[in-house]
């Protein structure tokens, strides 16, 4: 990930030949390590040292081996082989859209440019219009967005030609980690072992975030690649694209030693090295979908964080209205991201409830404690908001507080509070009073309309997310028609927001318990790949989807369904329409 590496050790569920589970799977252990971006004064630059990733991976694997007593094979002397934790496979999830440039020895030539690096905005515009004319008579390439990899490549060609001239491979972050785990040479024991320097691999999901992958043809668009770099170096640098159940290689002997699996072993022949396969791996969104069980059409994931993300399985390829991703099961994974989500509620809480007094820095611990007691929380704000009706008496909060809104593509949009009248302002102030709620605050919010504005902000974000879902449906046609949302992220714990989302979106909501869903999804993928590789021994070969659905994915007991109250639904429908009208009038012609 961008901030660190998280690892999960998972024991797969056991199944019979008919597919019924005989033993539940479960998480055995966890480990994590953090790192940060490289310091820079360059605007728009976001880079990391790939060695930081490798050191973190080494640390978390060694931690799991030590804590769980992981072994490479059951001990023949053990009286209870079933109780041993045998490491049978590894799967890697990585941040999408990064650019890792390697030389002919598979060594990084420069720091990796990350998904959030925007130095290549000009190159993006050129690829999307002028370069695209090489393969699209309409002069538009649907499968690239500003943060994707290919604009970063073009930026390097223009700005760092000496670096580009040394490039042998151009890979994504998870591709690089897989490559290092396999070693410079593929010295693990496998039927396909060889003595040559390893060729990097990727998967179709992560490749779809590069900006040069054609999800319809399921391959790189070489016409576009060669237009970006007529020298042919870019074309020769691309990793091989693997299928969902493929294995990219095996863990090298050196890595087994480094993480404590071969402490006393020093085999003189490669045939003595245990075989620990590494699955194809994938991007973090693709692996997150696996980790929460979003592998069938009709399902989608909603992540309520500082930004809001929605993605789900589609039968049909998406258009350029959304991120045109492929999933980890062989289908498509359209995605939209809204920049304004829980950060908006944080701003409302800080500005309208607590004000400057809530943010002041007190010097003594007693003063800190007293300040915290007076400070309003999201739970307090939610309780006040619940006293106001859906539609907020006609007040509409446009939530575009974060610059650069992506869905819709209104980068210059800003927040607004609209529909104020003397009557609804009076209602906002008188209902509720501080005495009518159960919070222990002895002072009211700094803004007497705070409760209503908090609800209006929450409704505005919800309408924004609902428009994102509608955009996804338009982009995919009949291929994306979700009827269930798996909701994750910090905002998913708010009870008022849960019911509001179900009512506005008209969908059932379920809540996965696992927060590190990308790491769990990578473990699922490794298990599926190992399971598929053993199917030639007379065992049924499962698809990735079938394998995932047999695993233990814990959900909260609560399932939130849309209300049957017609008045509530009507108020939300009117509020959403008013939101559309205001937004379009103010920002519909926003310059890009």
Image: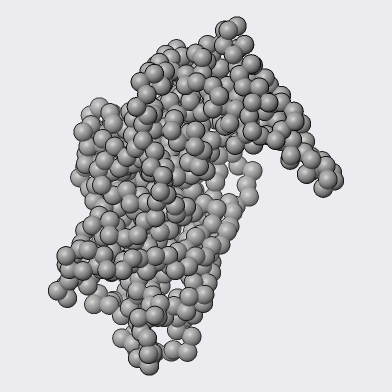
* Total residue callouts: 0
Residue 51 vs residue 318, the one in the foreground: 318
For this orientation, the residue located farthest to the bottom is: 77
Residue occupying the point 57% across, 21% down: 452
Residue 348 vs residue 331, the one in the foreground: 348
Residue 418 vs residue 152, the one in the foreground: 418
| Colouring scheme applied when the structure was drawn | one colour
Residue occupying the point 60% across, 27% down: 384
Please say if 574 is above or below 83: above
Please say if 288 is above or below 465: below
For this orientation, the residue located farthest to the right is: 364
Relative to 110, is 197 on the left or the right? left
Residue 569 vs residue 110, the one in the foreground: 569
Q: Position of residue 486 (x, y in %)?
A: 38, 44
Q: Quarter of the image holding residue 568?
A: top left
Q: Position of residue 272 (x, y in %)?
A: 34, 87
Please say if 578 is above or below 220: above
Relative to 263, is 170 on the left or the right? left
The C terminus is located in which quarter?
Answer: top left
Q: Quarter of the image holding residue 101?
A: bottom left
Q: Position of residue 138 (x, y in %)?
A: 25, 27
For this orientation, the residue located farthest to the left is: 538
Q: Position of residue 291 (x, y in %)?
A: 37, 54
Residue occupying the point 56% across, 17% down: 417
Relative to 215, is 268 on the left or the right? right
For the question of whether residue 7 can be seen, the reply is yes
Residue occupying the point 39% across, 38% down: 560
Please say if 209 is above or below 383: below
For the question of whether residue 401 can be seen, the reply is no
């Amino acid at each position: 990930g961008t901030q660190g590496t998280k690892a999960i050790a998972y024991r797969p569920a056991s199944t019979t030949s008919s597919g019924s589970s005989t033993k539940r799977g479960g998480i055995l252990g966890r480990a994590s390590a953090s790192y940060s971006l490289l310091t820079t004064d360059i605007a728009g630059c976001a880079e990391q040292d790939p060695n930081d990733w490798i050191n973190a991976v080494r640390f978390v694997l060694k931690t799991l081996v030590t804590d769980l007593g992981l072994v490479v094979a059951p001990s023949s002397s053990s009286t209870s082989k079933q109780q041993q934790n045998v490491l049978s496979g590894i799967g890697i999830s990585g941040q999408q859209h990064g650019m890792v440039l390697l030389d002919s020895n598979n060594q990084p030539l420069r720091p990796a440019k990350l998904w959030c690096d925007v130095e290549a905005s000009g190159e993006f515009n050129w690829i999307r219009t002028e370069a695209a004319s090489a393969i699209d008579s309409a002069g538009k390439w649907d499968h690239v967005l500003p943060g994707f990899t290919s604009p970063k490549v073009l930026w390097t060609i223009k700005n760092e030609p000496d670096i580009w001239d040394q490039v042998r491979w151009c890979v994504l972050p998870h591709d690089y980690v897989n490559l290092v785990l396999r070693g410079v040479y593929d010295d693990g024991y496998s039927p396909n072992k060889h003595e040559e320097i390893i060729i990097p691999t990727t998967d179709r999901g992560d490749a779809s975030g590069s900006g040069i992958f054609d999800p319809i043809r399921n391959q790189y668009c070489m016409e576009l690649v060669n237009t970006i770099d007529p020298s042919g170096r870019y074309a020769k640098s691309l990793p091989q694209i693997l299928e969902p159940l493929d294995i990219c290689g095996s863990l090298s002997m050196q890595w087994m030693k480094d993480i404590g699996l071969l402490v006393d072993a020093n085999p003189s022949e490669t045939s003595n090295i245990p075989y620990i396969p590494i699955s194809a791996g994938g991007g973090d969104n693709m692996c997150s979908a696996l980790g929460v069980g979003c592998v069938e059409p009709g399902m989608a994931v909603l992540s309520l964080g500082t930004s809001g993300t929605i993605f789900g399985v589609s039968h049909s390829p998406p258009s350029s209205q959304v991120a045109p991703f492929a999933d980890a099961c062989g289908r498509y994974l359209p995605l939209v991201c809204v920049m304004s989500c829980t950060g908006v509620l944080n701003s409302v809480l800080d500005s309208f409830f607590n004000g400057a007094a809530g943010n002041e820095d007190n010097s003594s611990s007693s003063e800190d404690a007293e300040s915290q007691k007076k400070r309003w929380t999201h739970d307090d704000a939610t309780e006040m908001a619940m006293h106001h009706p859906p539609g907020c008496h006609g007040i509409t909060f446009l939530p575009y507080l974060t610059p650069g809104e992506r869905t819709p593509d209104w980068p210059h949009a800003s927040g607004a509070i609209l529909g104020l009248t003397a009557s609804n302002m009076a209602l906002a102030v008188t209902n509720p009073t501080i005495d009518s709620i159960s919070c222990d605050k002895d002072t009211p919010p700094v803004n007497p309309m705070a409760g209503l504005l908090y609800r209006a902000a929450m409704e505005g974000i919800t309408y924004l997310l609902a428009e994102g879902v509608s955009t996804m449906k338009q982009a995919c046609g009949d291929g994306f028609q979700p009827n269930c949302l798996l909701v994750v992220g910090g905002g998913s714990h708010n009870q008022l927001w849960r019911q509001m989302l179900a009512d506005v979106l008209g969908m059932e909501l379920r809540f996965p318990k696992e927060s590190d869903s990308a790491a769990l999804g990578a473990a699922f993928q490794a298990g599926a790949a190992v399971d598929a590789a053993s199917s030639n021994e007379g065992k049924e070969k499962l698809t990735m989807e079938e394998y995932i659905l047999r695993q233990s994915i814990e959900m909260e007991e609560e399932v939130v369904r849309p209300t049957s109250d017609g008045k509530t639904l009507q108020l939300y429908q009117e509020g959403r329409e008013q939101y559309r009208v205001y937004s379009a009038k103010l920002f519909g012609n926003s310059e890009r």
